[in-house]
Amino acid sequence: MQVPAYVATKGAIAGVTRALNNEWMQQGINVNALAPGYIETELTSGIREDGERERAVLERVPLGRWGVPEDLSGAVVHLASAGSDFVGGEVYVVDGGFNAR
C-alpha cells in the first residue's frame, strides 16, 4: 500500500498549499510548493540500481535522464524572487516532462 499513501500525501500537499495561500496572501505571504520528479538522491538509489526499474523511469522522462538537485534551483530562485509576487497556491512540477506524458 505504498503507492496510495504516496499519492494521498501529494494531494494533501497541494491542498494545504492552496489553503495556506488563501489565508496568508493578503498579508504578503505567498505559499507555493515544489513537486520534484525522479531526482538522483539517496531515496531513489534503489530504483537507479535496479536496471529494469531505472529503464522504466527513463522511458517516461522526455528529457531522458534523472534530475539532479540543482535542477530545482531555477524554480526555487523564481519563487524567491519578485517575479513570483503574483503567484500563489501553485505546485511547481519539476520533473523533466514526466507528468506531461
Image: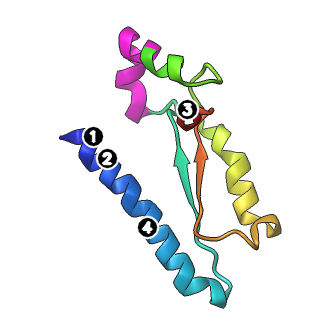
Q: Which amino acid lies under the numbered mark 2 shown in the image of this protein? A: Tyr
CA separation in Å, label 3 and label 2: 17 Å
Pinpoint residue 15: horizontal percent, then vertical percent: 43, 67
Name the residue tied to disc 4.
Answer: 15
Q: Quadrant of the N terminus?
A: top left
Q: Earlier in the sequence, mark 1 or mark 3?
A: 1
CA separation in Å, label 4 and label 2: 14 Å
Name the residue tied to disc 2.
Answer: 6
Name the residue tied to disc 1.
Answer: 3
CA separation in Å, label 1 and label 4: 18 Å
**Label 2: few (<14), some (14–19) or many (≥20) C-alpha neighbours in 10 Å:** few
Horizontally, is 29 left or right of 17 in the view? Answer: right
Q: What is the span of residues highlighted in magenta in the rendered image? A: 42-55
Horizontally, is 80 left or right of 47 in the view? Answer: right
Name the residue tied to disc 3.
Answer: 98
The secondary structure type at the circle numbered 3 is helix
Q: Main secondary structure of the magenta part?
A: helix
**Residue 46 magenta-highlighted:** yes
**Residue 53 magenta-highlighted:** yes
Q: Earlier in the sequence, mark 3 or mark 2?
A: 2
